[in-house]
Structures are given as C-alpha cells and as structure tokens.
Amino acid sequence: MFSEKSLKATTVIRVRFHECDPLQIVWHGNYLKYFEEGREDFSSKNGISYLQAKEHGFSTPIVKSVCEHKLPLHYGDVFEVETTFVNSEAAKIIFDYKIFKTGSLVCTGHTIQVFLNEKGELSLVNPLFFKDWKIKMGLI
Amino acid sequence: MFSEKSLKATTVIRVRFHECDPLQIVWHGNYLKYFEEGREDFSSKNGISYLQAKEHGFSTPIVKSVCEHKLPLHYGDVFEVETTFVNSEAAKIIFDYKIFKTGSLVCTGHTIQVFLNEKGELSLVNPLFFKDWKIKMGLI
Amino acid sequence: MFSEKSLKATTVIRVRFHECDPLQIVWHGNYLKYFEEGREDFSSKNGISYLQAKEHGFSTPIVKSVCEHKLPLHYGDVFEVETTFVNSEAAKIIFDYKIFKTGSLVCTGHTIQVFLNEKGELSLVNPLFFKDWKIKMGLI
Amino acid sequence: MFSEKSLKATTVIRVRFHECDPLQIVWHGNYLKYFEEGREDFSSKNGISYLQAKEHGFSTPIVKSVCEHKLPLHYGDVFEVETTFVNSEAAKIIFDYKIFKTGSLVCTGHTIQVFLNEKGELSLVNPLFFKDWKIKMGLI
C-alpha cells in the first residue's frame, strides 16, 4: 500500500549571505541549489540517492528544470522546501518543489532527470533498482 | 526599421573547472549563469542593462526560468550562448537562449523578468524608458 | 566576566552535490561559504550580525581570507565548522575557523573584516556599537 | 634559457551580476573563481593543465589559498588577473595572483597545490611530467 507521507519531504533552510544579490534578494539561480537540497533530503530519507544510482551503474543528470518566483527571499530568511516525487511511467525521475516562507508560497519548481548507463547511453526503460524502489514505496 | 541582428547576441564562454560537478559535467544550475552572461552581453550591446533600469527607478527580477538540456558540457569546452530578445506586449522582459558547442545544440532556455518600482510594486505597463528603448530598436 | 563559551560557535553542515567538483571533493573555494555559514551562525547566536552593523551605518567587508586544507570533504559528508572570535584591539573583526569530520581536522581558516562607514571610509577605531558588544561579551 | 614572459599570464574578466552580493560588490569568495580562471588561462597557454596532470595519473588539489583585498569590484567592472608561476623546489604548484582594475591593485592572492597519485597519496617529489615541463620552460 502506498504511503502518501513517503512521497514528500520538507527541508528547512536559512538564506546565506553569499546567496543574495545586489537587489538584496536571493539570486534566482540559487533556487536550483535549494531544489537540489530538497531532492537530496527526499532521496536520503527514502533510499534513492545519486550514490545508489551510481552503485547500480547509472547516473541521473537533470534534463529539465523550471522555477517560477512569486515572492523574494532575503538574507537570513528561514524557509521550507517541499519536495514531491511525481510518479511517472516514463524512465524519468520527476520532482515538484514548493518553497514556503511563514506559510506564504515563495516559488514553485520542477525538475526531470533521466537514467544514463555507464556508456552514457539513455535508458528507455526504468532500471531494475528504480523499479524495485518503486515497488518498495508502493508506487507500482 | 527593425534590425533582426540587434535582437540577438552571441557570447562565447569557456567552461571553468569550478562549474563542473562530480559527474564531470557542468552542474545544471550553472546554465542560469551562462544565460545571465548572455543576457548581460545582449543588454550591454543594446543599451538596456540592469543599471539603466535602476537609474529609472526599476528593478527587473526574474520571475520564471526554464532550462532544457540536450547534451552535456565538460571542463574546458568552449561554447556559444545565443540570446534572443522576445518582443511581447506585456510589461515583461523575455529572453530565449540557445547554447551551441561546435554547431550542436547543448541546451535551450527561457527567462521572464518583470518591472518593480522603487516601492517593490509590480508595474502592469511597460515603463517609459523601456518603451523608448523598444521604439529606438524598431520593435514598436 | 568573560564567557569562553560565547566566543565559539559550532555549526553542522552536510556537503551538497553542487559543492563538489570533478575530483569528487568539495571545490576549495566553497570552504569560504562554510566559513561564512559558521560566522553567520556565531553572529546570530551572539547578536553581532551584518544587519546589526548595517543598522549602525557600517558595512564589514572581508579584507583577508586564508584557508588551509588537510583532508578532503566528499558528497554527503556531515562536518562541523568551529568558528572562534579572535579578540583584537584593532578596528577589525577577526575569526578563526576549524572544520572537523568525525573528529579529524579537515581544514583551518581565518578571515579579517574591517568597518566602513556609509561613505565607504575605513574606520580606524572600533565603532561604538562594536565596543558595546565587546563590553557585553566581557571582552573589554 | 628562461623566458620571464612565459611565467605570467594576464586574463581579462568582466564582473557578472551573480558574483555580486548585497553590499553591491563582488562577494569575497568569488575571487577564488577569478584566481582559478587566471590559473587555468596560464595553464592552457603553457601546457600544464589539470587534464595533463590527470593523464599522468595525478590530481593537483589546492591545499592553501590566501586572498587580500585592497579595493572592491562592482558589477560590470572589467579587470585583469595577473597569474604568476612561483618556481619552487618542493613538490608543489605555487601561483601568485594580482587583480588590477584600470591600473589600480584590487587584490593579491596565493594558492598552493600538491600532487596526489591515483591512490590519493601525496607525492613528495615532483612527478616526471612536471619536471619535464619545468625543463621545457627553462625553470631547472
């Protein structure tokens, strides 16, 4: 049976000085670092990290990322990255992200990763270790 | 009359070591730096930079960014960012990006910026200085 | 009376993927981010942050930074930054840093900051707010 | 015979927006990126790059870096990194850096690299490929 809780991770981060730009807000490109931090947190909590993929002979490069900003973040702000695993039949790892500050939506985002084997070839089907993980998580 | 050439800028960049990740490729988030470098190059060539907006009392934060990867970039690669200004009636600054390495398409991208006045309020119409620039460029 | 404890802060950080380079270790320049994170943690715990300096009309740019590496850090490593305030009579803010991973010394570092007033002029004496802070901390 | 010219490289860089911090100046940690850009430029001009070391089974991690700031750099500034190879008998690669803006000294710096073999062991003597390079450059 599927556990809704296990498909989401919430990560608390504080804005660092060097992440802010001359407009006194977090530079837009740094949100991809926050998404990565959320994704890694989800992955380590759920046993599906970059290193696990590597052990099975796969790398999982990002092929698409999207970020939409609603509100700025400032130096010292504490915020939450909510990372949601999006189940898909395709041989892809898809995550949605929402960043909240004291309950307000700061931004939304989205990343897509694919599986490359050790020769750097795109895998058109889900690798066995990923299928096993999905079964363990009650996703298939 | 409208000059197609002036709506595009091509910027040559070399991948730096610190931009690469443990997969031996440019970390995906760094493409937003390349897009920014392309956008700044376009802007300085065409007289519409961040500083000019600031002089007129506006900041132009990014509200959306998209990046789609076709091929990786590696340490030392020399590539071209092709930045294209997308003319729009909305009070927005829109750019499309294409990155090429020796003729092959490496990635495509897209950013949207809005105008905030000195109070941080969203401008629903194009500021005068931006309209003037569009007229000068033959876009309206 | 002087409290030794208050002159030191320990900050726990986990290495993020984008902080690692093609050698599979944290890129050397990112240690300055870790030092900053340690410094900010010390400062927020002890009421002497960048924002407090700003309120009193001062900025505190870094004029010197040193980092010496003993051991590498890898992706996913959890480590401690030990930030120590170095008391000095000069109009400077000096910090020493030590990074430890499971008890082993990973690197040492050092930063010096000065006080600039709102005109950007170097302050040759400690600003009043900084003296007050030192008195409160039992340092003078 | 030794050619003084070949021991120095000058690299022209323009400050990018994302390199600047809320103080409207280049964030101090980004100077290590500029030093790296200077070092890579020197290395590619003189045939002694990271990739050449790797081909010979060595990595060359940085074990010490120092940066001293005299003047700030601002968004859009064009500056020169002057990278100087410091000849040393030790099994080390040492570089000095000076950054100039329109003739004024902005900062000075220094990095030390060591040689690690494929097992990650420190080489106490200069690897053969590095000795050969020094001979070719007239340094020994």
Image (spheres, coloured by chain):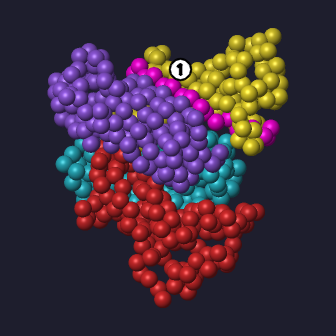
Chain colours: A purple, B yellow, C red, D cyan
The magenta region covers: B55-79
The percent position of residue D40, horizontal first and vertical second, equals: 46, 42
Residue A29 visible from this viewpoint: no
Magenta residue check for B71: yes
Mark 1 nearby-residue class (10 Å; few <14, some 14–19, many ≥20): many
Amino acid at pointer 1 = Lys
The percent position of residue A96, horizontal first and vertical second, equals: 41, 30
Residue drawn at point x = 25 percent, y = 64 percent: C104
Q: Quadrant of residue A88?
A: top left
Number of marks in picture? 1
Residue drawn at point x = 43 percent, y = 34 percent: A97
Parent chain of label 1: B
Judged from the image, the secondary structure of the residue bearing numbered disc 1 is strand
Mark 1 = which residue? B98
Q: Is residue A74 left or right of residue B87?
A: left
Q: Is residue D13 left or right of residue A92?
A: right
Q: Is residue A6 left or right of residue D83?
A: left
Of residue B112 and residue D71, the one placed in the foreground of this image is B112
C87 shown above or below B5? below
On the rendered image, what quadrant is the N terminus of chain B found in? top right
A123 shown above or below C83? above
Residue drawn at point x = 40 percent, y = 21 percent: B71
Residue drawn at point x = 59 percent, y = 31 percent: B63
